[in-house]
Image (spheres, rainbow, N blue to C red):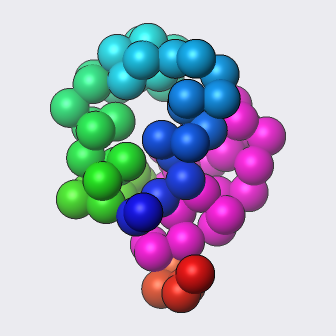
Amino acid sequence: MKTKLKVLRAEKNLTQAQLAKILGTNQVNVSAWETGKAVPRPPMMQKISDYFGVKKEDIFFTAFNYSN
């Protein structure tokens, strides 16, 4: 798993498209973030962190070069 975003999204029973709308982005971006193909910019990371109530380092650990 590249990020915990998919797990967090599933816990809230959201589709990628629904989460994208909440965050003000598109489904393609959400998919890329979930698979680790792309990393959101810091302001978006913070928005995601705030929405889920989880530290951004815990969601995007690979972006911070953490091993898990």
Query: Is residue 47 something one can see in this rendering?
Result: no
Q: Residue at x 47, y 58 (%)?
A: 3
Q: Relative to 9, is 14 above or below? A: above
Please, which residue is most extreme toward the right here? 53
47 versus 34 height, above or below: above
Nearer to us in this view, 44 or 60? 60
Q: Nearer the viewer, residue 37 or 13?
A: 13
Please identify the quarter of the rendering in which residue 18 is found: top left
| Nearer the observer, 41 or 49 | 49
Which quadrant, please, contains the N terminus?
bottom left
Q: Residue 15, position in %: x, y?
A: 42, 17
Work out whether residue 1 can be spotted. yes
Residue 51 place in picture, x, y as percent: 69, 31
Left or right of residue 57: residue 29: left
Which of the image's four quarters has the C terminus? bottom right
Q: Which residues are magenta?
A: 42-63
Which secondary structure is most common in the magenta stretch?
helix
- Residue 59 falls in which quadrant of the image? bottom right
Q: Is residue 60 above or below residue 9?
A: below
* Residue at image coords 52%, 17%: 14
| Residue at image point 37% right, 48% down | 34
Is residue 49 within the magenta segment? yes
Q: Position of residue 12 (x, y in %)?
A: 65, 22
Judged left or right of residue 44, residue 20 is left
Residue 8, position as x, y percentages in the image: 61, 38
**Residue shown at the point (30%, 53%) measured from the top left:** 35
Q: Is residue 23 magenta?
A: no
Total numbered circles: 0
Q: Nearer the viewer, residue 43 or 53?
A: 53
